[in-house]
Structures are given as C-alpha cells and as structure tokens.
Image: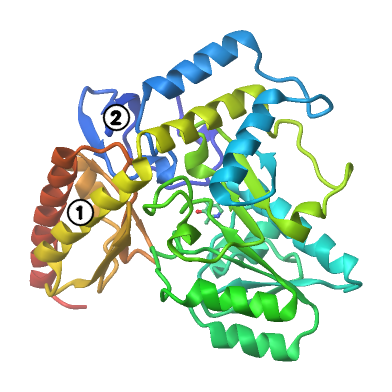
Amino acid sequence: MAQQSLMNTYNRLSVSFESGEGAWLFDTDGNRYLDALSGIAVCGLGHSHPAITKAITEQASKLIHTSNLYRIPLQEQLGDRLTEIAGMDSVFFANSGAEANEAAIKIARKFGHAKEIESPAIIVMDGSFHGRTLATLSATGNRATQAGFEPLVSGFIRAPFNDANAVRSIAASNKNVVAILVEPIQGEAGIRIPDSEYLAELRDICDENDWLLMLDEVQTGNGRTGRYFAYQHTYIVPDVVTTAKGLGNGFPIGACLAKGRAAEVFMPGSHGSTFGGTPLACAVGLAVTETIMQENLCDRAAELGDRMLQGFKENLEGMPYIREVRGKGLMIAIELTEAGTELAVLAKVKGILLNITGGGKVIRLLPPLIMTDAEADLLVNTLCKLIKIYAADERSKPRK
Ligand SMILES: *Cc1c(COP(=O)(O)O)cnc(C)c1O
C-alpha cells in the first residue's frame, strides 16, 4: 500500500480508521478518538447509526439505481420532505455540495437570460467557499482555491462578507446582477457568523432589485446550527438553498431547493445528473431527515452547542493566544491570535479529531448532533487543557 498512487491533493494526518460508533472512531491500532469533526459536518448522526445502516442495507438489497428517465418514488418522497422542511417549492438532487451549487448558479443564469440580461452576474462574498468545480471555485472567495486554475468562470462579482451596504452599492452601479450566493455562516473561512440582520438586509436588496437570494447551506444545513437550515433562525426565506454534507450522513447526496420563480426556471433538458437522486441515495436522505426530525436533533444541536460554547468561553476567553470563541449550534470556532496548525496533530494524540481552518488560526469543531453531554464535556475539558499547555509552550519560545 502506498500513498504515492493517490494524487497529491491532501495533507493527511497519519492515522486511519477501521470502524466507528456514535461520536467515536477506532483506528487500525485499536485507539479510540472522539470525533469533533464528523468528516467535515457530514456524519451529523455519528458513525454506524442504526437507522442509516438499515436504510442502506435494505434499499441496496432491493434497488440501487434506475435512471432519472423514470419516476423514482423515493426521490419524490425525499423531495416532499425537504421542500416541506425548507418552505421551498421544488428540488433538484445532485451528488455533492459543489454540484448542488452548480445547479443554483445555472438557475440564476437562466433566470437572468429570461429577463433578457445577456451577461448575468452573481454577487459572491470574500472568504466564501462554494466547492472545487470550475464554476464553484470561481465563486469561492479564496485565492488559494483558484490559483493555477485560470481562466476562471466569469460572471461573479465579489463583495465583503457581512456588509450589506457594499452589496447596495454594487446594485446601484451594475445592471447585470441577477442573484446573491452566500453562506449564512461561512464555514471554511473559520465559522464567520454575520450580524443577525445581515440575511434580512440581503433579502430586502434582492426584493428591491428583482434578484434571487441563494443560500449555500451545504455545511450549515441539516440541523447543524440548531435549526434544520440556518436561515430558519431568521424570518426570511431564500429563493434558492443548496445543501449536501449532512444530508447523507456519509452517503453522497446534494440538493438544490428553489421557490417561486426560481423553481420554474429549469425545463426538461436544462439540467441533469446520472446519479442524482438514486433510490439508494434518497432512502438514506429520508432516513437522515426522519431521524433528525423525530429525535429533535435540531434542538439538541442548539443545546449541545450552547453547553460547549459556554465551557470554552469560561475556560479560554481572555487568555493570551485566544482571539475569540464563537459558535452557533454545533459550528464552534476557537480563533487563535497566531497560526496553530500543529494543534490538529496534538489533539489527535489526545484522542480528539478536529480541524484547523481560517488560515491556520481557527480551531473548527463540527461535532455530531448525537453527542452525549458527557462526551461534550470530555471534548471541552481535553481541548481546553491542550490549548492551555500549547499556548504556554508557544509563549516561552524565543520570538523570531
Ligand atoms: C463543503 C462545502 C461545499 C462543497 O461541497 P462538496 O460536497 O465538497 O462538493 C460547498 N459549499 C460549502 C459552504 C461547503 O462547506
């Protein structure tokens, strides 16, 4: 076995897992790790959840794939369930977050062409992350994601995140804009939470200018922030919302939901996907949504998130080396004053899986929604101890 046969796209930690149960992963040497990352906001129901295992095994033994050339009852059922939860009218199923966003981008462009805008543009935000396909990396507000892949897809106009006035001034000067694409909370940028009025202000701007408000809830959706979708903390409803990660608990599935005119843009032939919305993927999506709703996991995420956020704040706030502790539900960030990339390795040694993002300065925690209070407390205590030791070590090092 050699890593050399894999394209060099990831800096991987030297650990691999053999099995998982709930919030725990077990490595090939028999060590256990508390999973505070959930495969990057994917395994919200934890590992080996019985409802998901059952949905996969039962459906796989019956029927995996047919084709979107035929009706797929499970796709219709999941469509009903998701549109009802989201307050949307219709859905297109894809296989990933980037693909769900591709569908949204295509809806916006076609919506623009229907209004006779020849070169429709979408406003996207600094620091955003929308995926790795050419259109979604062009929409992404991070040069590192784009560098080397020029020419980028045109038709994106960038604005600073959490600045509605900047969007207003683009509205005043650019007649080609047809939509805004924005994450309700920026995940990859380091869990950046905008002011509580931000989404409502963007909604107003979209209404005033006849634009579509498109929310990328690939990371924030499926209960993670304490509501099924993050915009459900507000009173606004978007025209388009995309989701993926947590929807399949590890099985690949993405969804682009739309409302009103945005829901009527696509015609047969406008868009498609061979794999999108297979019976198997939709059986899993149904099991995930049903489990989240039946077990009140949105409320549980809010409660668990508050518990951990409070613990981290009590332990770390005001300490040197800590810039800010923030979070919404189970998206928790501990922002450092300096890059601390080694913390992911040190945490792994202590049996905690987490991720460092936001230019190396943000410890990002995305624990599963099914974590127990005892596991949450263990996570807070272990991590706070580790950070304190690390911060003291860093301060005692000679300055360069
Ligand atoms: C992860 C992510 C994506 C991309 O999803 P993939 O499934 O990796 O294509 C898009 N948008 C946001 C906000 C994400 O967090």
Give the residue type at disc 1: Met
Ranked by sequence position, the earlier of labels 1 and 2 is 2
- The image quarter containing residue 317 is bottom left
In the displayed structure image, the side of residue 271 where residue 253 appears, left or right: left
Q: Is residue 167 above or below residue 270?
A: below
Label pair 1/2, CB-CB below 8 angstroms = no
Residue picked out by circle 2: 22
Q: Residues within 10 Å of mark 1 (few under 14, many from 20)?
A: many
Q: Position of residue 192 (x, y in %)?
A: 40, 68
Q: CA distance from mark 1 to mark 2?
A: 18 Å
Element under disc 2: loop
Q: Residues within 10 Å of mark 2 (few under 14, many from 20)?
A: many
Q: Position of residue 311 (x, y in %)?
A: 14, 57
Label 1 near ligand 1 (CB < 8 Å): no
Rendered residue at 72%/72% (across/down): 211
Rendered residue at 80%/78% (across/down): 176
Residue picked out by circle 1: 308
Q: Which image quarter is the C terminus in?
A: bottom left
Rendered residue at 35%/63% (across/down): 360
Give the residue type at disc 2: Gly
Q: Position of residue 329 (x, y in %)?
A: 32, 55
In the displayed structure image, the side of residue 21 where residue 4 appears, left or right: right
Does residue 148 show up? Answer: no
Element under disc 1: helix
